[in-house]
Amino acid sequence: MDCVFCNIISGKIPAQKIAETEDLIVIKDIAPKMPIHYLIIPKKHVKDMRGFDDSDMILGAKICAIARQLSRQLNNTDFRLVISNGHDAGQRVFHMHVHFLAGAVIAE
């Protein structure tokens, strides 16, 4: 498998790591859309949320917990979590990940 996120997780590709747990890694996005743009990535390769099985659902809680932790580390900054599932929804890397976006008001 030639997955860029799996290669980052294994250390084959360098990335600016923000946080890491047993199940997740958080890195800075290389093409940020906001002043703070992190990617929360499960270490287990799952294509998208539709690929989660029942045993993977705990990752959702862990993703929320690390997002809360990131916010606290940033002085309780407001943030948005974005998950794209499938090409038509904007997903370009097919390893499930969550965008943590903060640092500016987002126009609706």
Image (spheres, helix red, strand yellow):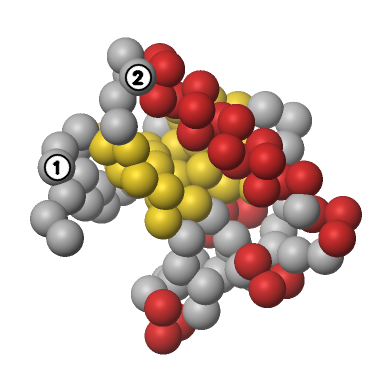
* Image location of residue 49, percent across then percent down: 64, 66
The crowding category of the residue bearing disc 2, from other C-alpha atoms within 10 Å (few below 14, some 14 to 19, many at least 20), is few
Q: Which residue is mark 2?
A: 76
Q: Is residue 85 left or right of residue 106?
A: right
Q: Who's the residue at 47% across and 60% down the image?
A: 83
Residue type, numbered disc 1:
Val
The crowding category of the residue bearing disc 1, from other C-alpha atoms within 10 Å (few below 14, some 14 to 19, many at least 20), is few
Which mark is first along the chain, 2 or 1? 2
Image: 108 above or below 89: above
Q: Who's the residue at 35% across and 19% down the image?
A: 76
* Image location of residue 60, percent across then percent down: 66, 48
The quadrant the N terminus occupies is bottom right
Image: 52 above or below 30: below
* Image location of residue 21, percent across then percent down: 67, 28
Res. 29 image quadrant? top left
Q: Residue furthest bottom?
A: 88
Q: Who's the residue at 56% across and 30% down the image?
A: 66
Q: Could you tell me how far apart the alpha carbons at marks 1 and 2 are, in whole angstroms?
A: 15 Å
Q: In the rendered image, is residue 66 in sight?
A: yes
Q: How many marks?
A: 2
Q: Who's the residue at 75% across and 65% down the image?
A: 52
Q: Is residue 99 left or right of residue 42?
A: left
Badge 2 marks a residue whose secondary structure is loop
Residue type, numbered disc 2:
Asn
Badge 1 marks a residue whose secondary structure is loop
Image: 79 above or below 57: above
Q: Which mark is residue 105?
A: 1
